[in-house]
Image (spheres, rainbow, N blue to C red):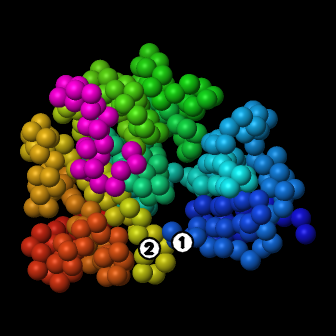
């Protein structure tokens, strides 16, 4: 029986799937509430897979696929949904992974993110990083922040993405969206030439290398707000990654530039909720004078200790955020422990003997 791609998309949409997996020789799979679900459908044949590929990929994308084993692009079903698509090979056989991109950009409130994140959208210059593992909602959080600026401020916002994901409608702001390989050659060149396009805010899809980071620092030093993502699991790990880009002896100079431009790092995870769905746990490290002082001395371990003791919404550890989700009945104790990177501290919080857990303002954490 021929595979009906459109019908599968509709069923996946009704199941609230976040990701769809298609691989020749295997049955399609879905990710729902963070878990992979294998369907009982027949394995996709060569013709099935080629039919999907011809339906979702334009001619230029198909040409790229002939020359590369990894290609990113977008697919849209008008008035239904958009998808970020990755084509790759799995044991020599073609595979497609589709990430669902909502048409409507959710607000910070709708995502149940900390209210304090809205304060970062009022900053005029510097660098704000949103970090976390793949599938942790980084792009959605950034999109919500960008759309908040769009709603409230008269700015020119440039996005540089690979590929372009969320589509914005001009509100108070003017928005220019540029995709790698279509509108610009790289993140670095996109930032460089973006500075000549009268921007106020530049969204960079991801900082992957030293060249992109240097371009982002330069943009922020010249009075622009730069928003971007990194694949790191905590705020302190992000600082280590940044310094790791400059292990050739230039780290002391770049450290001073980072101190001068860093405004905040936000690290997040998505945790399974007790009643179904996902909840975001969010670590926040605002660039307070104390944080920057420790950073200048390269005392990164002291930054986390500072965050542990803080009662400010600008300094919140991942454990404090996870604990607040548990305390508010959104997640179970087992999930809190499973997703904590510091399980001993979390166990103390759950037993009520960790003093940092007693006086938290939960409204600032969720």
Foreground disc of the pair 1, 2: 1
Q: Is residue 233 magenta?
A: yes
Decide: is 358 above or below 351: above
Q: Is residue 158 left or right of residue 86?
A: left
- The residue that appears at 40% across and 34% down in the rendered structure is 209
Nearer-the-camera pick, 85 or 118? 85
Answer with mark 1 or mark 2, whichever residue precedes in sequence. 1
Q: Position of residue 320 (x, y in %)?
A: 22, 67
Quarter of the image with the C terminus is bottom left
The residue identified by callout 1 is: 35
* Residue occupied by mark 2: 272
Q: Position of residue 295 (x, y in %)?
A: 14, 41
Residue 65 image offset from top left, x and y in percent: 72, 39
Residue 344 showing in the rendered view: yes
Residue at x-position 36% and y-position 47%: 130
Local secondary structure at mark 2? strand
10 Å neighbourhood of mark 1: few (<14), some, or many (≥20)? Answer: few
Q: Assign the N terminus to one quadrant of the image.
A: bottom right
> Which contiguous range is marked in magenta?
230-253
Q: CA distance from mark 1 to mark 2?
A: 9 Å
Is residue 355 toward the left or the right of residue 343 in the image? Answer: left
- Labelled pair 1, 2 in contact (Cβ < 8 Å): yes
């Amino acid at each position: 029986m021929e595979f009906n791609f459109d019908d599968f998309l509709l069923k996946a949409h009704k199941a609230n799937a976040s990701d769809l997996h298609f691989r020749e020789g295997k049955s399609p799979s879905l990710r729902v509430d963070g878990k992979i679900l294998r369907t009982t459908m027949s394995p996709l044949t060569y013709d099935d897979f080629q039919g999907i590929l011809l339906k979702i990929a334009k001619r230029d994308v198909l040409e790229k696929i002939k020359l590369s084993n990894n290609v990113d692009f977008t697919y849209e079903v008008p008035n239904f949904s958009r998808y970020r698509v990755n084509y790759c090979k799995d044991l020599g056989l073609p595979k497609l992974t589709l990430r669902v991109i909502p048409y409507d950009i959710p607000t910070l409130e709708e995502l149940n993110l900390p209210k304090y994140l809205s304060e970062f959208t009022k900053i005029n210059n510097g660098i704000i990083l949103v970090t976390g593992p793949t599938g942790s909602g980084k792009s959605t959080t950034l999109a919500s922040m960008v759309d908040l600026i769009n709603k409230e401020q008269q700015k020119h916002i440039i996005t540089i993405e690979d590929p372009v994901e969320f589509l914005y409608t001009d509100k108070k702001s003017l928005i220019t969206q540029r995709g790698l390989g279509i509108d610009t050659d790289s993140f670095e060149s996109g930032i460089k030439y973006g500075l000549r396009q009268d921007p106020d805010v530049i969204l960079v899809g991801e900082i992957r290398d030293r060249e992109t980071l240097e371009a982002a620092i330069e943009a922020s030093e010249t009075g622009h707000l730069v928003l971007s993502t990194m694949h790191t699991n905590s705020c302190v790990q992000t600082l280590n990654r940044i310094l790791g880009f400059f292990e050739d002896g230039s780290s002391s100079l770049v450290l001073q530039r980072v101190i001068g431009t860093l405004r905040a790092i936000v690290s997040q995870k998505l945790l399974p909720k007790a009643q179904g769905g996902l909840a975001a746990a969010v670590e926040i490290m605002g660039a307070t004078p104390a944080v920057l002082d420790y950073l200048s001395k390269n005392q990164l371990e002291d930054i986390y200790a500072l965050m542990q003791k803080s009662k400010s919404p600008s300094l919140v550890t991942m454990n404090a955020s996870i604990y607040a989700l548990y305390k508010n009945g959104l997640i179970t104790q087992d999930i809190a422990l499973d997703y904590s990177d510091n399980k001993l501290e979390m166990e103390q919080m759950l037993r009520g003997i960790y003093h940092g857990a007693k006086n938290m303002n939960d409204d600032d954490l969720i």
